[in-house]
Image: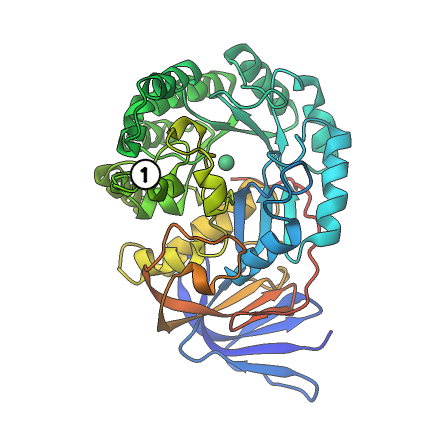
């Protein structure tokens, strides 16, 4: 593979941004230097005025392939959308693809993804009452962590009840594994939703009342208590609430091995999206936990500014408008989840860096560095440093655009961010030194499986 020099870009390093040349050889970053000397067969990219950052990592996606729902989205399409969004490594959740609850299922999914993904990828396994004794075999297969649903999930992938959550935390601790939870109190959320449904409530704006903040807060407290007393590692997925941010800040400051993830839709959207006279339009925004209030959104930004949010992941779960509307006028039947891999980077830049809420290294910390550390692939991934994989995003901060389903790479016919003005755009994406995306055009690329390594946050 020939040498590439990305010249005079603003390189986002761990703690600062510097203008320098980045040299790529054999798929790795070989040097960061003030003036690289090009040789004959070297490709030189002028990145003057552009931000050069590590390839982004998404640690929370739900691609439906392989499995019974792969008519919704296949791995090639999903990973192409991710690449268009600057993601060079994607870590996929163990459902609603085939439920990844043991080594055989892990291998089965791995085979499909290996053939199809255009970006590097890692895989989650599940933790349920059915498979506590299978966590270790998945760890040996390279699994990065184990996701449990404290709310009700599916028959094939049941809720992790408290006793099994404790057993799972103990088991994962033995080999340094990470348990991650969807934190909502199962019965309270379920009965809340059913009571609205029984009353024929067609007001989507009541969705947040059906599973309110304290449903999430209680589950966060319960799961983190177990993890703290057991000295086990725990990730709180898609955290949405002010009270949770305050509680987790306190726990983290006392040394608990608790990690916090939030998502762009909780940072950017507010519960007014549900307050739409067209119920079926509001259906597009149904996800769990629900999109919260402005005060929660502001609290999440503040927590991110203070370094208390570890990752911003997409929780990508892609449905078409027709699939979302199949629930008709009962919000308990609308499939939950929003598409997200394509727009996360540009949204975080627009609303975070361009609006002065966070600096570029802060953005890279939650999109690149912390994800790589948490899932044990740092410094191979997540950082611009000699010896690391040359997963690079060249970002042009000078352009402006508008998000629209009409011009997105992903196949779904809507985006939750329709009409939102954006600052900057992704000029190029390199995957292990190979140009994978050039000004929106997807080029040939082949992803590789990334096993969980040893390092951690
Ligand atoms: Zn999820």
Q: Residue furthest top?
A: 163
Closest to the observer, 190 or 40 = 190
Closest to the observer, 200 or 241 = 200
Looking at the image, is 335 positioned above or below residue 216?
Answer: below
Category of crowding for the residue at label 1, using alpha-carbon neighbours closer than 10 angstroms: few (below 14), some (14–19), many (at least 20) = some
Q: Residue furthest left?
A: 295
**Residue 171: horizontal and vertical position, in percent?**
63, 19
Closest to the observer, 274 or 351 = 274
Looking at the image, is 260 positioned above or below residue 439?
Answer: above
Describe residue 229's horizontal placement relative to residue 301 as left or right.
right
Q: Which residue is mark 1?
A: 279
Inspect this view and state whether residue 146 appears: yes
Describe residue 81's horizontal placement relative to residue 325 as left or right.
right
Inspect this view and state whether residue 379 appears: no
**What residue is drawn where x is 45% and y is 46%?**
321
**Residue 163: horizontal and vertical position, in percent?**
54, 10
Q: Secondary structure at mark 1?
A: helix
**Residue 106: horizontal and vertical position, in percent?**
72, 35
Q: Quadrant of residue 441?
A: bottom right
**What residue is drawn where x is 54% and y is 15%?**
166
- Placement of the N terminus among the 4 image quadrants: bottom right
């Amino acid at each position: 593979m020939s040498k590439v020099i990305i010249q005079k870009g603003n390189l986002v390093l761990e703690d600062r941004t510097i203008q320098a040349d980045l040299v790529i050889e054999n798929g790795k970053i070989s040097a960061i230097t003030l003036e690289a000397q090009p040789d004959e067969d070297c490709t030189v990219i002028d990145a003057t005025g552009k931000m050069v950052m590590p390839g982004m990592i998404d640690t929370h996606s739900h691609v439906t392939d392989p499995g019974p729902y792969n008519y919704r989205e296949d791995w090639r399409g999903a990973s192409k959308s991710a690449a268009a969004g600057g993601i060079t490594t994607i870590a996929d959740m163990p459902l609603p693809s085939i439920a990844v609850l043991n080594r055989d299922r892990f291998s089965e999914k791995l085979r499909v993804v290996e053939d199809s993904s255009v970006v590097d990828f890692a895989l989650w396994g599940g933790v349920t009452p059915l498979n506590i004794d299978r966590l270790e075999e998945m760890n040996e297969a390279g699994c990065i962590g184990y996701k449990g649903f404290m709310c009700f999930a599916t028959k094939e992938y049941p809720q992790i009840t408290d006793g099994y959550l404790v057993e799972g935390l103990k088991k994962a601790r033995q080999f340094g594994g990470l348990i991650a939870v969807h934190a909502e109190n199962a019965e309270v959320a379920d009965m809340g939703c059913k009571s609205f449904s029984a009353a024929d409530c067609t007001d989507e704006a009541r969705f947040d009342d059906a599973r309110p903040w304290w449903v999430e807060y209680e589950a966060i407290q319960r799961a983190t208590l177990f993890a703290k007393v057991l000295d086990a590692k725990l990730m709180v997925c898609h955290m949405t609430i002010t009270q949770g941010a305050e509680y987790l800040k306190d726990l983290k400051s006392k040394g608990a091995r608790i990690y916090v993830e939030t998502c762009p839709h909780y940072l950017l959207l507010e519960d007014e999206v549900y307050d739409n006279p067209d119920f079926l339009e509001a259906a597009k925004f149904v996800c769990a936990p629900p999109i919260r209030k402005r005060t929660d959104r502001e609290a999440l930004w503040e927590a991110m500014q203070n370094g208390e949010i570890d990752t911003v992941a997409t929780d990508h779960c892609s449905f078409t408008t027709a699939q979302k509307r199949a629930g008709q006028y009962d919000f308990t039947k609308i499939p939950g989840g929003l598409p997200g891999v394509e727009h996360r980077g540009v949204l975080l830049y627009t609303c975070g860096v361009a609006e002065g809420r966070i600096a570029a290294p802060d953005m890279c910390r939650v999109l690149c560095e912390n994800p790589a550390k948490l899932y044990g692939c740092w410094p191979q991934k997540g950082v611009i440093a000699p010896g690391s994989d040359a997963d690079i995003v060249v970002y042009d901060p000078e352009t402006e655009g508008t998000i629209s389903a009409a011009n997105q790479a992903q196949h779904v016919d809507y985006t939750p961010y329709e009409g939102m003005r954006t600052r900057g755009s992704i000029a190029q994406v390199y995957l292990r030194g190979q140009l994978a995306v050039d000004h929106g055009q997807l080029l040939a690329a082949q992803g590789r499986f990334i096993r969980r390594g040893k390092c951690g946050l």
